[in-house]
Amino acid sequence: MNALAATNRNFKHAAKILGLDSKLERSLLIPFREIKVECTIPKDDGTLASYVGFRVQHDNARGPMKGGIRYHPEVDPDEVNALAQLMTWKTAVANIPYGGAKGGIGCIPGELSSSELERLTRVFTQKIHDLIGVHTDVPAPDMGTNSQTMAWILDEYSKFHGYSPAIVTGKPIDLGGSLGRDAATGRGVLFAAEALLSEYGKSISGQRFVIQGFGNVGSWAARLISEAGGKVVAVSDVTGAIKNTEGLDIPKLLEHSAKNRSIRGFEGANALDPNSLLIEDCDVLIPAALGGVINKENANDIRAKFIVEAANHPTDPEADEILSKRGVHILPDIYANAGGVTVSYFEWVQNIQGFMWDEKKVNNELKNYMTRAFKDLKSMCKNHNCDLRMGAFTLGVNRVARATLLRGWEA
Ligand SMILES: NC(=O)C1=CN([C@@H]2O[C@H](COP(=O)(O)OP(=O)(O)OC[C@H]3O[C@@H](n4cnc5c(N)ncnc54)[C@H](O)[C@@H]3O)[C@@H](O)[C@H]2O)C=CC1
Ligand SMILES: O=C(O)CCC(=O)C(=O)O
């Protein structure tokens, strides 16, 4: 199912559970603003290349819009719309004072040189600089982008508006980035998995994990889970998949992956068909790459008892139904991967205050936010007799609806 159709379906289900007024429902669904820009750059060989960039600003009832920028060939308006809407519910679930946005450029970042990526990022920033802002819309990294991308956006934006470190989060520490932001989404996934497992009298230690994606989120999740005693038995990245039923040596795999920019060829593991990764035998499955990967084609074959959604919208609503009938517990993206945007919020706060927190404070605060959000989500599940996804959606949608109503519509 198309990402936007899936996200809208979940939103409408939550609106029905909450008994939301139909006009309010419609107003919450329509994005605040959709931006589409042409970005042409000279390539290193002197030829020109044109790309399409998007920024969808979904909602700002609770504060400045917030969300990552993705560089990926499959970036399209529907996908960015869905991701922006998810950010609105996610920041509300985490209870941080933001709305939601998302951006992206349709490109293959691995095929562009560093100087080409820099030119593309600067042109994109020139096209959107007057529509983003420290108190209006604050970008961050997502798939295919990183702290260097944020540094280029900061620099380009600052040419127009003066030095503005708080215009982006997830930037390098030397430019006002927060300690702990790089690991934050993976660390949040660890806290989320701990919270879910503890409901069933289990802990990370002794559980077997499969992780799809070994980029920022997947690799940090693998590292922190293995440090907490979990056994990571299989992982994949865009180049392939590997497995070791005894548990992969994650520190060595991190070294291998950093050196080779791929997990392939790692000694101490067997190669695995990437198509069978999601249906590998394990206790906890962590999709940490693309959307829509858990769908009606593979939902019946998934053997995990728990799914912790580190990626955005990895599970189609049809798969949700199948898995829920089979008793699989799914911790949804808008809670499970909220650690990243939560520490982005801490980074923004530090920039505005001109004060730097130590890493222990960042990680402790992240744990507090994730723990509180899990409790809030569970109480929505109890009040509305619904599953974890609807617990999270009703929590987020209700908070945004309340803020919208309080602000009113007077012209
Ligand atoms: N970076 C962040 O702070 C946050 C990221 N997310 C989500 O987490 C997911 C991963 O994002 P990042 O780790 O930041 O991206 P990244 O670009 O650092 O890493 C992406 C990883 O996915 C792998 N991958 C790509 N296509 C694949 C495929 N077909 N099969 C298996 N692996 C594949 C890549 O090889 C890479 O290992 C995305 O859905 C993103 O939206 C969610 C919240 C915050
Ligand atoms: O850190 C942020 O502001 C946003 C991260 C993001 O794009 C996401 O949570 O999907």
Image (spheres, helix red, strand yellow):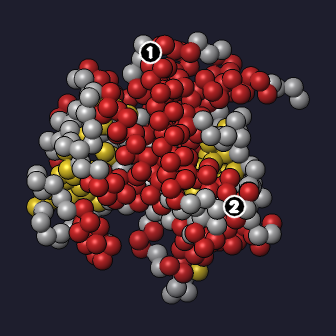
Q: Is residue 381 left or right of residue 24?
A: left
Whether residue 204 is visible:
yes
Q: Is residue 138 left or right of residue 315?
A: right
User: Between marks 1 and 2, how big is the CA–CA gap?
Assistant: 40 Å
Who comes first in sequence, dot 1 or dot 2? 2
* Disc 1: CA contacts within 10 A as few (<14), some (14-19) or many (>=20): few
User: Quadrant of the image for the C terminus?
Assistant: top right
Using the image as rendered, state which of residue 8 and residue 191 is in the foreground. Answer: 191
Using the image as rendered, state which of residue 132 and residue 97 is in the foreground. Answer: 97
Disc nearest the viewer among 1 and 2: 2
Q: Horizontal and vertical percent for residue 348? A: 66, 55
Q: Secondary structure at mark 1?
A: helix
Whether residue 279 is visible:
no
Are the residues tagged 1 and 2 within 8 Å (C-beta)? no
Which residue is drawn at the image coordinates 64% and 71% (left, top)?
Answer: 175
Residue found at the very far bottom of the displayed protein: 45
Q: Is residue 387 left or right of residue 23?
A: left
Q: Which residue is mark 2?
A: 355
Q: Which residue is mark 1?
A: 382
Quadrant position of residue 192: top left
Q: Please state which amino acid type lies under the numbered disc 1.
A: Lys
Q: Please state which amino acid type lies under the numbered disc 2.
A: Phe
Q: Is residue 206 above or below residue 347?
A: above
User: Quadrant of the image for the N terminus?
Assistant: top left
Which residue is drawn at the image coordinates 69% and 61% (left, top)?
Answer: 355
Quadrant position of residue 2: top left
Q: Is residue 256 above or below residue 90?
A: below
